[in-house]
């Protein structure tokens, strides 16, 4: 795998429908895996296409003819392509669609989804909604100059991407020179011990008053420094994801830096090759990266406990430890409307790749009176997800307010 040529960077030229314009499109080029997997393909309205099934008399395989009733264009779709077409409702991202494909067929073709999107774009049967919900909301109010400027800024930041597709040798070498030890039973035991010790240290720090007093007269600057340091631990988080791919014999396709949703600076790694491995491999790959924050948080708490009381080092270490542990919980906890590692583990286990979107659509329909008939099991799952997410977010906000009050009183 280390001697093989790296996969080519997939650059897609995509037609994005202009807001409020049924016939106008903008051409957008997407070159990074981070942006690509978050896109949400939207097929044309149901009255703009027709679909007919054609069964071969020879091999009895079903094919489908898709017609654009506005342009009189015809396409031939295979049964897997028809499945993908059904998923392109504007709510599911490319990553969600790929997960649904794996759960349905037990395999993944990296070229099928991009190829189908290109084909549907040429036939004017598909458009894209912005991946960022915030930018989508701004795009709906372009008549306001300030909001239009904000959308343009987010769009520019989304296009910032510093990445490389030639990273497999780096990850393979890092795995050979010690990275593989992270996936041993000894590493798991060490992680659990650090978690317990870190928890004890955190409880002792919590009982002390004025932990944040060491920041002195510039608490805002100190907090910004803590968050800047935290950004580099996000790189470690993604690197461990990449090492997990090597551990299971898969390829790391890309590693880089971008702005998530146009305003959150973060590192990312393309782990789509893990779709070809077992469910256990997918779960381990997702969870392993989050444990980085658990370990770093414990180490920071231990340092804060041993640092001089009321000093800058104690305040900085305690704040860093709290931020790391919050990141661990947010990354692993699936019920918070954020599609992070824990959420992807949940949908993989349940076999419901569009859980969040289906749940929100169903609960919204309960208030609008236009709900579609679903099974009791599905209704319970969707309502449970939304309720748990709302309660969890409220509890998280209350907890953070409590922490600030406790640390500064």
Image: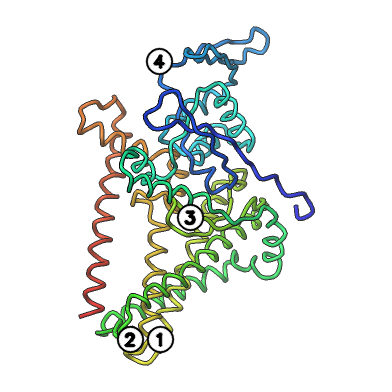
The mark nearer the N terminus, 3 or 4, is: 4
The CA span between labels 3 and 4 is 37 Å
Q: Quadrant of residue 303?
A: bottom left
- Disc ID at residue 313: 1
Q: Is the residue under label 4 in contact with that under label 3 (CB below 8 Å)?
A: no
For numbered disc 1, what is the local secondary structure?
A: helix
Which residue reaches farthest front? 145
The CA span between labels 3 and 2 is 32 Å
Instruction: Judge from the rendering whether residue 176 lies leftward or rightward of residue 185; answer left or right.
Output: right
Instruction: Judge from the rendering whether residue 386 lies leftward or rightward of residue 354; answer left or right.
Output: left
The mark nearer the N terminus, 1 or 2, is: 2
The mark nearer the N terminus, 3 or 1, is: 3
Tell me where residue 328 appears, x and y as whole percent: 42, 63
The CA span between labels 4 and 1 is 64 Å
Instruction: Judge from the rendering whether residue 82 lies leftward or rightward of residue 332; answer left or right.
Output: right
Tell me where residue 326 appears, x and y as whole percent: 37, 65
The mark nearer the N terminus, 4 or 1, is: 4
Crowding near the residue tagged with mark 3, few <14, some 14–19, many ≥20 C-alpha atoms within 10 Å: many
Q: Quadrant of residue 62?
A: top right
Q: Nearer the viewer, mark 3 or mark 4?
A: 3
Q: Is the residue under label 2 in contact with that under label 1 (CB below 8 Å)?
A: yes
Tell me where residue 226 appears, x and y as whole percent: 41, 74
For numbered disc 2, what is the local secondary structure?
A: helix
- Disc ID at residue 214: 2
Name the residue tied to disc 3: 259
Camera-side residue of 103 and 91:
91
For numbered disc 4, what is the local secondary structure?
A: helix
Residue located at (45% from left, 39% from top) = 353
Name the residue tied to disc 4: 47
Crowding near the residue tagged with mark 2, few <14, some 14–19, many ≥20 C-alpha atoms within 10 Å: some
Q: Is the residue under label 1 in contact with that under label 3 (CB below 8 Å)?
A: no
């Amino acid at each position: 795998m280390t001697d093989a040529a790296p996969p080519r960077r997939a650059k897609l030229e995509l037609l994005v429908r202009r807001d409020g314009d049924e016939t106008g499109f903008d051409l957008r080029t997407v070159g990074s895996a981070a942006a690509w997997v978050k896109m949400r393909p939207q097929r044309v309205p149901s009255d703009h296409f027709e679909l007919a099934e054609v069964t071969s008399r020879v091999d009895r395989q079903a094919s489908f003819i898709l017609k654009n009733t506005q342009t009189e264009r015809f396409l031939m779709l295979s049964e897997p392509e028809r499945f993908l077409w059904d998923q392109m409702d504007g709510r599911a991202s490319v990553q969600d669609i790929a997960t649904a494909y794996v759960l349905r067929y037990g395999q993944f073709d990296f070229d099928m989804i991009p190829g189908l999107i290109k084909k549907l774009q040429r036939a004017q049967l598909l458009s894209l909604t912005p991946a960022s919900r915030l930018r989508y909301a701004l795009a709906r109010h372009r008549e306001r100059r300030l909001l239009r400027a904000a959308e343009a800024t987010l769009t520019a930041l989304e296009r910032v991407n510093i990445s490389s597709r030639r990273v497999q040798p780096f990850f393979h070498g890092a795995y050979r020179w010690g990275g593989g030890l992270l996936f041993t039973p000894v590493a798991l035991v060490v992680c659990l011990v650090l978690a317990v010790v870190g928890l004890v240290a955190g409880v002792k720090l919590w009982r002390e008053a004025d932990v944040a007093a060491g920041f002195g007269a510039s608490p805002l600057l100190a907090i910004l420094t803590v968050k800047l340091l935290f950004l580099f631990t996000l790189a470690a988080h993604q690197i461990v994801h990449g090492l997990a791919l090597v551990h299971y014999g898969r390829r790391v396709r890309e590693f880089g830096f971008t702005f998530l949703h146009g305003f959150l600076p973060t590192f990312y790694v393309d782990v789509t090759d893990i779709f070809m491995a077992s469910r256990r491999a997918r779960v381990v790959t997702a969870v392993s990266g989050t444990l980085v924050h658990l370990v770093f948080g414990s180490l920071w708490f231990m340092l804060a406990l041993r640092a001089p009381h009321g000093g800058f080092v104690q305040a900085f270490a305690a704040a860093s430890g709290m931020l790391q542990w919050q990141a661990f919980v947010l990354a692993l906890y699936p019920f918070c409307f954020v599609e992070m590692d824990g959420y992807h583990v949940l949908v993989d286990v349940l076999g419901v790749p569009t859980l969040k979107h289906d749940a929100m659509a169903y609960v919204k329909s309960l208030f609008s009176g236009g709900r579609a008939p679903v099974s009791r099991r599905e209704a319970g799952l969707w309502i449970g997800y939304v309720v748990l997410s709302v309660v969890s977010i409220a509890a998280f906000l209350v907890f953070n307010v409590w922490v600030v009050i406790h640390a500064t009183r």
